[in-house]
Image: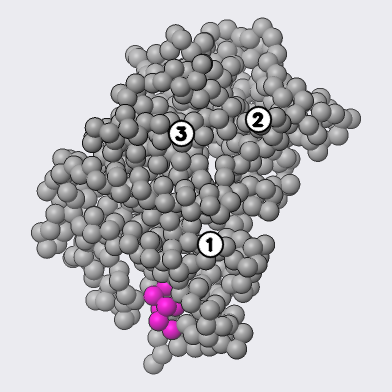
Amino acid sequence: MKKIIFLVLIAVLPVFSSCSDYLDKRPDDQLDVDSAFENSKNLDRWLAYIYDGIPAYYADSNWDMIADDAATPAEWIAVGNKVCLYQEGSWTASDGQIINFWSDLPKRIRSAYIFIEKAHPLTDVTQKDIDIMKAECRFFIAYFHSLLVMTYGSVPLITEAAPTTNAEDLMLKQEPFYDVVTWCANELEEVSKQLPLTYTDQANDYGRATSLWALAMRARLLTFAASPLVNGNPDLAGIVNCDGEQIFSTTYDPSWWRTAAQANKDLIDAAEENGYELYEADPVDGESDPYMSYFGAVMLRRNQGNYEIIMPRTEDGPGWMDMKAAPRSIQGQAGVVGVTQNLVDAFFMANGKVAITGYGANGQPIINPDSGYNEEGFSTADVTAKTRYFYNDPAGVDGRQENVITQKNTFNMYCGREPRFYVSVMYNESFNWAKTHKDQAASNPPAKYVNFFFGKEDGKDGTDYPTAGYLMKKRIAPDYLGSSSGGEFSGRHGVVYRLAEAYLSYAECLYEYSVSSGEYSANKDEIFKYINKIRKRAGIPEYRSAELPEPSEAEMRDLIHRERRIEMNCEAGLRWNDLRRWKEAEDVLDGEFYGMDMASGTDRASFYKRTRYQTRVFRSYWWPIPQDDIDRNPNLRQLPGW
C-alpha cells in the first residue's frame, strides 16, 4: 500500500512565482508520496509547505509578549490566556503550545528530506530548477534544526526522513547541544554555496531562500552558541540524555565568540558586496531622515528601495496586528497590542545618552543626570524636526519640512527622545498617526491625539486595553483606518533577518572575544565602526564624537546590549532570544512590571505615574517539550524547570 503523508497545504501557485503566492492560499489536499513528484503543481505545493514553517512575524505578538517588548492586559489571565500563564509562572509542559516548533518543525524537516530524495526533472521543471529546490530543502533542514536547538536546548538530530510516521520510527534521542550546533552551522555554510545570491526573476522570486539566508541563519545560530547561556554556564551541569551523555558543556570557550564574529563578518561582506545596505530615506546633503529610515527598514520591500532585508517572510498577514495595535478611536479592534514601560525606558535621548540606568524601590527609575531626561511635568513648547514621518502639515509631506515631533504640553518622559522612540511607541496624547497621514485630505478634521485616560475612547475598556499605557507603533501600518487590508502597506513582509542585526551581532561577538583574549584595544575601532553605523542611521550622536566621548571597555557590553534592544525591538522573538542567551531573563522577566496608570488614571495627575500592573514569575531558559511527547518517547528528557 502506498504511503500517504497528510499536509496542511498553504499554496497552489508554482514555486517559480513569489513566496507570497504560495503562502496565502489554503486548499485542502493530500498527496501520495510516490506520485506527488510527477506533477509540477504538487511539487510546488510540497515546497510551499516547507516554506510555511518560517515563523510568522505578524500573525501574533506572543514572541514579544513573553519577553519584555510587548504588554498584555493583566485581566487576560482570568480567561486562561496562554501568554499570561507563561508570564505569571503557571505555564506547564502539558499546556497547549505558544511556540509549537517541537510539534511542527520535525514534520517539515521530514518533508524536506523526502523532497530531496524523490524530486526529479519534469517537462516543465529543469534539472537546474530541481537542484535549487533541493538546496532550499537542505537550507530548511538546517534552519529548522537551529530553531529547535535554540528554543529547547536538547533536541534530536534528524539526518534522514523516518521510514514511516509510526511511533517506533520517531523514537529519537537528544544529542549534545554543540553537536547539533556544529552540524547545523556546517550545513548552512555548505548550502550557502549551492543557493543563488539572487534569482533571475527577482520580482516574482522575492522571498525564496538565497545564499545570504543561509549565512544569516548560521551567524544567528553561532552568536547564540557563543553566549553565556550555553558557553560555560555552570547551571547546566548534570543535564544528560538517555545515554548519560552531557548535553551542555560547562567550560567557557572564547573561541566560540571568535567563530561567531567571523560568521557575522562573512555575512556582512557577502551582503554588502551584493548591494545590501542599511535603509536610509530622503537623503539631503549626506544626511537621511532618521524617522523615515527606521520606519522603512521594516515596512518597505526591496522593490520599494529597501535593500536592508536579507530574509523576508512574504505576505505575513499584517492586518491582524494593524487591527489590534490601532487605537479604538480609529476603529481598531481593542487597541490592545502595546509595548512595555521597560522598552520605553530603554531608548536613548536625542543627545545619544542613556536616560535610565536601572530601577530602585517600587519600580522608580534611576535617572542618568547627564542625559537631560525628566519625567516630571510637561513640555512648554513644540519640538519640530525635518521629517515626513509626522504628517501634521498635509502641505509639507512631499519633502523634509519641519513637522512637530512632540507638541507643547507633552509629558516630559516622552520629550527629547531619539527618533526610534517615536517610530516605535504610541504614548498618551501623542499624534494618532492615521489621522495625520499624507493620504488625509487637508479638509479632514485636524490632527487627532490618542486618549488613554481611563474611560476615554482609547483607554481601558473591559479586558482589552493598552495595559502599560502604550500601543505598539513599529511595524504597524500608519494608514490603518478600520480596515484589515493594511492600506498602502498591505503588501509588506515579515522581517526574519535584516542587515542591522548582522552589524550588531558582529560588534557584540568581536567585543566579547576581544575582552576574553585581551585584544580589545586592537579591535575596538572595528567594534565602534559597526555600532556607529546603527547610531548614525538612527540620527543620534556616534560614540567617539564631540557629543559622546569613547565609553570604557567595561561600559561597552551594556551599551551594545542596549543598542540591540532598541534597534531590534518588537521584531518577533529577537528580544526573547537575547534575554535568554545573555542569561538576563531571570532578572528582567521575574518581578514587578510597571506602566502608566491605565486602571484609574482619569487625568494627567493620576495617569502619568508609574503603577504596577503585573507580577511576573520566570520559570526556565528553555521552552518545554510537550508532555505528551515526553510520555510517548522514553528516549526524551525534559530540561529542568518543567
Q: Is residue 615 visible?
A: no
Residue ID for mark 2: 287
Q: Position of residue 203 (x, y in %)?
A: 67, 62
Q: Is residue 445 left or right of residue 275?
A: right
Q: Earlier in the sequence, mark 2 or mark 3?
A: 2
**Residue at the location (17% across, 49% down)?**
249
**Residue at the location (73% across, 47% down)?**
487
Q: Is residue 544 left or right of residue 320?
A: left
Mark 3 belongs to which amino acid?
Lys
* In the rendered image, the vertical position of residue 250 relative to residue 74, given as above or below: below
Q: Is residue 158 left or right of residue 124?
A: left
Q: Position of residue 66 (x, y in %)?
A: 41, 40
- Cα gap from disc 2 to disc 1, whole angstroms: 30 Å
Q: Earlier in the sequence, mark 2 or mark 1?
A: 1
Residue ID for mark 3: 529
Question: Mark 2 Cα within 10 Å, few/some/many (few <14, many 20+)?
Answer: few
Span highlighted in magenta in the image: 112-118
In the rendered image, the quadrant that contains the N terminus is bottom left
Q: Position of residue 14 (x, y in %)?
A: 62, 74
Front position in the image: 341 or 545: 545
Secondary structure at badge 1 equals loop
